[in-house]
Amino acid sequence: MNKGEYQLRVSMIVAVDNNYLMGSDNGGLPWKGIEKDKNHFRKYVASKTLLVGRKTFEEMDGWFQEHHTPYVLTRRIGYQTNSHTHVFNEIQDAIDYAKEKTVEEIVVCGGSEIYRLALQYTTTIILTILDSCFRVGGEPKFFPSIEELKSFGFEKYKEEYFKPSVQNEVGMSIIWLNRDRHLVPGLRK
């Protein structure tokens, strides 16, 4: 691929409940043991560059493999991780670095503040909706609803439904949303 054809793609992968709850300020996911979603996440992010916030990165400690390239976004100046990880204090710096390295895709994996900051750069959202309502300790964190995402130019183009099973106590839908690149303010440059 020559430089003239190169275009960075930014996607998000996120799981929510029926109320679009994705977590809390205490960290972690409000649910456990939903293998279908866990496997879907792992398969999608394999061998990709992952953008996460510092808290999410620390919660996922030990999860990242050599085939992942973590980009950690933090307000902490001088934050240190291993040599396999890149640390940024501004999201634009992470985007610029990815472009410089001709990264094909950055997958935004949370937390809530990182999703909010990255929305202006995102062309694809892979949204898992768990067919249940969960409670969290601490302040709940929500992802925008499909209707809200439509107001940003996203359109649903694919949906798969999975019934509850022995491995997954709740049903779930995986919904793919896209928007035209020209509608993405952060990638126009």
Image (cartoon, rainbow, N blue to C red):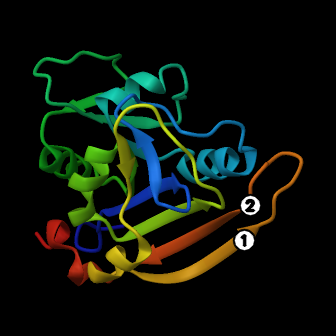
Q: Tag 2, which secondary structure? A: loop
Residue drawn 45% across the image and 25% down it: 59
Judged left or right of residue 15, residue 88 is left
Numbered disc in front, either 1 or 2? 2
Q: Which callout, 1 or 2, points at the residue further toward the start of the chain?
A: 1
- Towards the viewer: 42 or 172: 172
Name the image quarter holding residue 6.
bottom left
Count of numbered tags: 2
Quadrant where the C terminus sits is bottom left
Quadrant where the N terminus sits is bottom left
Q: Tag 1, which secondary structure? A: strand
Residue drawn 48% across the image and 54% down it: 14
Name the image quarter holding residue 123.
bottom left
Judged left or right of residue 56, residue 181 is left
Residue drawn 22% across the image and 83% down it: 182
Residue 23: give x, y in percent of width and height.
44, 42
Name the image quarter holding residue 150.
bottom left
Residue beneath disc 1: 161
Judged left or right of residue 105, residue 18 is right
* Residue 97 circle label: none
48 up-or-down from 85: above or below? below
Residues under numbered marks 1 and 2 in contact, where contact means CB atoms less than 8 Å apart: yes
- Towards the viewer: 142 or 185: 142
